[in-house]
Amino acid sequence: MTVTIDDFRRFFPEFSEVLDEIVTAYMAQAELYISPDEGTILSGNKLKLAICLMAAHLLILSKADGLTASQLAMGSVGGVELSKSVGNVSTSKAAPPFTDNYTYWLNQTSYGQRFLALLESLFVTPMLTGGEFIRF
């Protein structure tokens, strides 16, 4: 499946000021993390959304040229605030507790969080009730 710059712009109009060349480069990087081939767990519009979410996640993490401060703030999540100061403005954050580095990395931006939620929605966990597996 081919994911185009138009798909990205449709999902994320907030990146309209970022040059097409930059977005295209990050979309190519996103395809290194997510296979663009149909037949995997992701397909159709979910596959397009996943690649675009990963590209947006990578864009925010890289602070790519053309991103405004408000775009960075909107996509950025960061860690748990431990302290802050008013005079000379300083803050201190701790890494949020996650079970693995990949989940922590995805939780650094709102786009990564949405990507993770999309992935988690694809897996059904069977429940054991009365000795039998029942799928919900």
Image: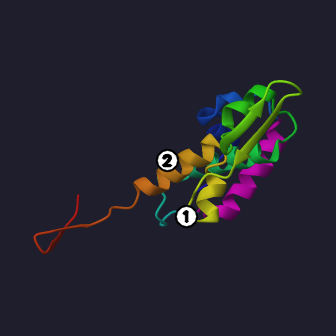
Taking the spot 80% from the left edge, 24% from the top edge, the residue there is 86
Name the residue type under label 1.
Thr
Task: Estimate how packed mark 2 is, as few (under 14), some (14 to 19) or many (20 or more) residues with alpha carbons within 10 Å.
Answer: few
| Span colored in magenta | 19-36
Q: How many marks?
A: 2
Q: In the rendering, at what x and y percent does residue 39 appear?
A: 47, 66
Measured in 3D between alpha carbons, the distance from the residue under mark 2 to the one under mark 1, in whole angstroms, is 29 Å
Q: In the image shown, does 73 or 98 lie closer to the viewer?
A: 98
Residue 75 sits above or below residue 98 on the image: above
Indicate the quadrant where residue 13 lies: top right
Query: Residue at label 1?
Result: 99
Q: Secondary structure at mark 1?
A: loop
Q: In the image shown, does 76 or 79 lie closer to the viewer?
A: 79
Q: Quadrant of the N terminus?
A: bottom right
Residue 29 lies within the magenta run: yes
Query: Residue at label 2?
Result: 45
